[in-house]
Image: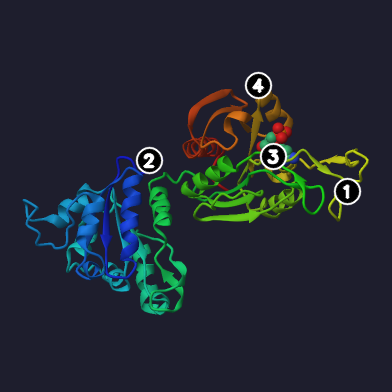
Amino acid sequence: MEDLAKKHILLGLSGGVACYKSAELCRLMMKAGATVQVVMTEAASRFITPVTLQALSQRPVYLSQWDERAANGMAHINLGREADACLVAPASADFIAKLAQGRADDLLSLLCLARPSQRVPLLVAPAMNREMWAHPATRRNVAQLLADGATVLDVGRGEQACGETGDGRMLEPAEIVQDLVAAFQPKVLAGHHVLVTAGPTYEAMDPVRGITNLSSGKMGFAIARAASEAGAEVTLVAGPVGQPTPRGVARIDVRSARDMLAAVQASQDRATVFIACAAVADWRVAQPGSQKIKKDGSGLPPPLEFVENPDILATVAASGRARRGELFCVGFAAESHDLLTHAQAKRVRKGVPLLVGNIGPDTFGQDDNALLLVDAVGVTEVPRAPKLVLARGLMTEIARRLAAKGPAP
Ligand code: C5P
């Protein structure tokens, strides 16, 4: 997906071993559709050559404020104004200190200071030794950058180039790209807490076998990501799926429908939006075997009895907070036919203000989907698109309905 299409990113590198990751970062941003202009400090060019970044970005790299390519002699003005965002990765402790003080003695710090800060956001991806990261001076400088409106990305934890272990590694390139993409999304759910269920459930028959379904979890994970990008705090209760956790999302892994209900109930008091996207098994085995059920030679299947699982969505929608309008509930319906009729009936049956219909066989495991939004007013068809695009659109729809109700509690 070209998440950075039409975006021009100024990628600044300051000195640090993490510069080797910036080559991959540049490549990933280009792959996501961005154009990238690289600016390096003198220290950065000791860790990786400008030629590498020129080849990857397909543009000559800028190294000095005295660069003669700028006809007006003002590279620091031009570069900052043509960018949609400035991303400094890696941002060394020294470079962060410089930004915090507003010093401008090289091209990169100069253009960060000179950029039109209301229009061109500044993101910094710190990278340094754990002691430097924990030092009160760095803490002060980071706090100052935040107060000045910059976005300071997280740091990774683990083995450092110096041989020590701790906080301060630069995030992985794919993580930085996710954070950059998120920075461009409108914060329509800021102040909200979105609780999402995703994936299938697994109902054990015995310790080795069970009943599950083909839900990949992709739609629910896309919703969790889109909610986080939209500025919400997000809790994702996920059935057994192998999807990576979206950045900034708190994930709770569960197996059965009853585990999922318990996890949802533990979080629902803090949530302001509940989106039930999971394909919950309707039935579970009443008495799962404590040992593997063996064939007994009779040729007959084992006598399994089933009981109905709790309906998580209907339970939450019937709670006091949902009924008082403090928790906005959204359900999903995966149907094979007569989508509109079934979706309308399901919305009423589950007692939710918004129900999202989709055709099950057309969505399971796919990267794209088409939706039908059904509420008390009417029906909106959302044409086929990647699940993340649909999820972002759904966040806008939910935010519009929440705004009509008043501010977040
Ligand atoms: O009844 P049906 O399974 O078709 O309803 C689908 C909607 O209800 C989805 O939002 C799904 O996540 C939710 N659901 C639930 N708990 C169940 C069954 C469905 O939350 N036991």
Q: Position of residue 250 (x, y in %)?
A: 58, 56
Label 1, label 3: how far apart the Cα atoms are:
20 Å
**Left of 78 or right of it: where is 336?**
right
Q: Earlier in the sequence, mark 2 or mark 1?
A: 2
Q: Position of residue 134 (x, y in %)?
A: 43, 77
Between residue 207 and residue 30, name the one nearer to us: 207
Q: Earlier in the sequence, mark 2 or mark 3?
A: 2
Task: Confirm whether residue 335 shows in the render.
Answer: yes
For disc 2, the neighbor class at 10 Å (few under 14, some 14 to 19, many from 20) is few
Q: Looking at the rendering, in which quadrant would you find the N terminus? A: top left
Between residue 122 and residue 180, name the one nearer to us: 180
Label 4, label 3: how far apart the Cα atoms are:
19 Å
Q: Amino acid at mark 4?
A: His
Q: Which residue is mark 4?
A: 337
Asked if marks 1 and 4 touch (Cβ < 8 Å), the reply is no
Q: Position of residue 39 (x, y in %)?
A: 21, 59
Between residue 249 and residue 114, name the one nearer to us: 249
The residue at the point 42 percent across, 62 percent down is 171
Which label belongs to residue 2? 2
Please identify the residue farthest to the front as the structure is shown: 297
Q: Earlier in the sequence, mark 1 or mark 3?
A: 3
Which label belongs to residue 287? 1
**Mark in the foreground, 1 or 4:** 1
Q: Amino acid at mark 1?
A: Gln
Element on which disc 2 rests: loop
Label 1, label 4: how far apart the Cα atoms are:
34 Å
Q: Which residue is mark 3?
A: 213
Label 2, label 1: how far apart the Cα atoms are:
49 Å
